[in-house]
Image: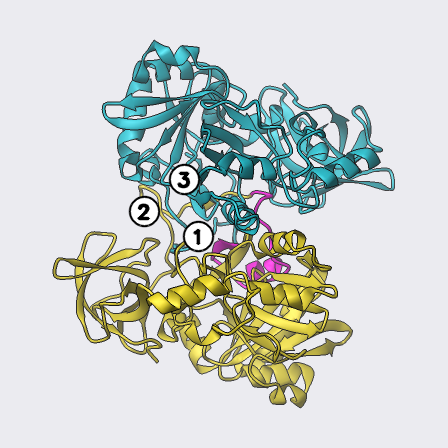
Chain colours: A cyan, B yellow
Amino acid sequence: MSAPAFVNANNEPFRLTPSTRIRRSPFYQATVAAGAQSFTVYNHMLMPTGYGDPDAEYWRLLNTVSMWDVAVERQIELCGPDAMRLAQLLVPRKLDRLRPGVGWYVPVCDHRGTLINDPILLKLSEERCWFSIADGDLASFARTIGAERGLDVRVTEPDVSPLAIQGPLAEDVTACLFGDKVRSIKHFHFRDLDLDGMSLKVARSGWSKQGGFELYLQDGSLGTELWNRVALAGASFGIGPGTPNPSERIESGLLSWGGDTDDQTNPFEVRMSRFVDLDAPDEVLSIRALRAIHADGPKRHQLGVLLGNDAPYPTTDLWCTVQAGNTALGAVTATAWSPRIERNIGLALVSRAAAPGDPVEVTLPDGRAINGELCRVPFL
Amino acid sequence: MSAPAFVNANNEPFRLTPSTRIRRSPFYQATVAAGAQSFTVYNHMLMPTGYGDPDAEYWRLLNTVSMWDVAVERQIELCGPDAMRLAQLLVPRKLDRLRPGVGWYVPVCDHRGTLINDPILLKLSEERCWFSIADGDLASFARTIGAERGLDVRVTEPDVSPLAIQGPLAEDVTACLFGDKVRSIKHFHFRDLDLDGMSLKVARSGWSKQGGFELYLQDGSLGTELWNRVALAGASFGIGPGTPNPSERIESGLLSWGGDTDDQTNPFEVRMSRFVDLDAPDEVLSIRALRAIHADGPKRHQLGVLLGNDAPYPTTDLWCTVQAGNTALGAVTATAWSPRIERNIGLALVSRAAAPGDPVEVTLPDGRAINGELCRVPFL
């Protein structure tokens, strides 16, 4: 399996043109030195997507431990007396029980109830929190609501860049760096820890289901130093460079906001119902719209789809149509070869009329019509 | 001069990984067939940045005519009784004299007076307008203000994709397609015109100073057809594929929002003072902040910088520091080789203490310190 790429008419990979509109990560030099071969652009920033050997990167995440530059998960900081009030306006989940030192996965929805981001909300104190965001401009949204409501809060994007350590041995690597105290950090909890004077927040989190930590670097000039420290600590555990993994994340049912969603998607459609409190305060921007959508019943839902097992399909950048007979059901929003299931799998955003177990036809961008079967997610 | 690219540790171009987060343009297939070799990501969409011969592409734009996929200039539509009222809230320029059929270059500023986009605002009717945007999420911003203020307006991103025809022969090509009536379209004015049943808006506009038109396609399924029609009409004029040109746009002093600006930049700093009316209505979101900034005096301004003439510098994705002696002045935000001036030139965002004619030192990302001289823009 070679690394996928957008290609020109001669099937050669496109060049990605340097531009000051597209920022580097603090870990950029280190990832290039580590052999990064492919990238994407996310939050106006480069993110490595592969080091040239997708198979090895997948199994490393599954069997040992992998380190990822996820600095593109920018932090949007709300700071001031009204910080948590503004956070609550943006999030249809009751935040009164969120304590400092804890992160929650939350939907951020606009007045229509549309999902405009799916960040982790880290509460730093009663007057300060970070949204660790997906690929969308949450800073402008938060700042605008704060200003419109006359709130006493400052919205910034501080110099904070997460480095993820993921995989079954991630805890051992992280304990090597910070001591055994990290073993008691609960899922989505975080602590301020020090690495020879480098100030980090260490959270048990990450965009995989293989377990692990994210180290929030708070000084971009130290990116290479942190990368090298983690690589060194992980060497005896077999650590190697990796990235958010397209196969593992589909197997695990992790949402890619902007990839699996469109500009009409609400949280009920993409398995986020348990993160919506319909009795959240009335002042939450989206709560009236979400109550109405919930009462009407959402029109779509996210399911998995099991596809062919002959050979991996090319990675597609297009949504693929899904139908049953002549009935259009919606779209497959992402596909990948699953090395564990040994077939192609995908995530589908389809009509509520479609259910797990239904046979469907999926049309790949190359025109092939593939027979598949809808299923529940996660796959594994 | 070869096409610039982000490169790996072996100096090979990075691959750009396909993702459903990154959309294709309706002209994508046509640009690939025409030989597109390099791309950027802009408004979560692919945009061609080169066809493999930067010199030829520059001179084609200067001497004959070039056709560009600029579908990434997404249109944000405001529609409804309060459409123009919402537009006015977002724009610190008095819009009461903007007539249907005319586009204006406008700053969009937030409550802090910060420039959050620099679109063309096309007024379609008294109840409908489009912002033809730079690389930032204006839809969410506009929709949020509309909702917070309870305005009767719908904010959408319709299926509209501009194709630019630029260069001294652009008018002839456009007249071949639509007839001589396009010759009377004034700068930034637009008309609804038909191309054998294909409904287009034709504007005299474009991100170059070489003259030309933008054809606003309103049905994405017809992208290849429109591209091919333009290529055919332009064949006898020497038309060829091109892109927004990094050299010509610096020579001409055209702003790249997000590249030449940061998250603190106000319109006075980047030569947009003439598009700010300080006596705009008080309800304009940014007007109080802009009046205060204007009264205090902006802290920075945008100038040009003349650099070395020995050989083109590598295209940089990093801002370069500018100093005079030991005094830090700011940053060069973009550089390019100017084939007409026959030296490297750049745009600089520097302290008001710096003035045209000042000698400065610019530190390139490769560490070289270059002597330069500040100057006014445009260069040509």
Q: Along the polypeptide, which appears first: circle 1 or circle 3?
A: 1
Chain ID, mark 1: A
Q: Name the residue under label 3.
A: A37
Res A314 seen here:
no
Residue at mark 3 shares a chain with residue at mark 2: no
The residues bearing labels 1 and 3 have C-alpha atoms spaced at a distance of: 12 Å
Q: In this view, does A350 lie above or below B87?
A: above
Residue at mark 1 shares a chain with residue at mark 3: yes
Q: Which residues fall within the magenta stretch?
A: B19-42
Res A99 seen here:
yes
Determine whether, in the image, residue A126 is placed left or right of residue B12.
right
Determine whether, in the image, residue A352 is placed left or right of residue A336.
right
Q: In this view, does B90 lie above or below A167?
A: below
Q: Where is residue A241 in the image (x, y as percent from the top left)?
A: 39, 28
Q: Residue at x 76, y 35 (%)?
A: A291
Q: Name the residue under label 1.
A: A15
Chain ID, mark 2: B
Q: Residue at x 38, y 61 (%)?
A: B260
Q: What element carries label 1?
A: strand
Membership of B40 in magenta stretch? yes
Q: Mark 2 points at which residue?
A: B11
Q: Where is residue A158 in the image (x, y as percent from the top left)?
A: 38, 41
Q: In this view, does A106 lie above or below B85?
A: above
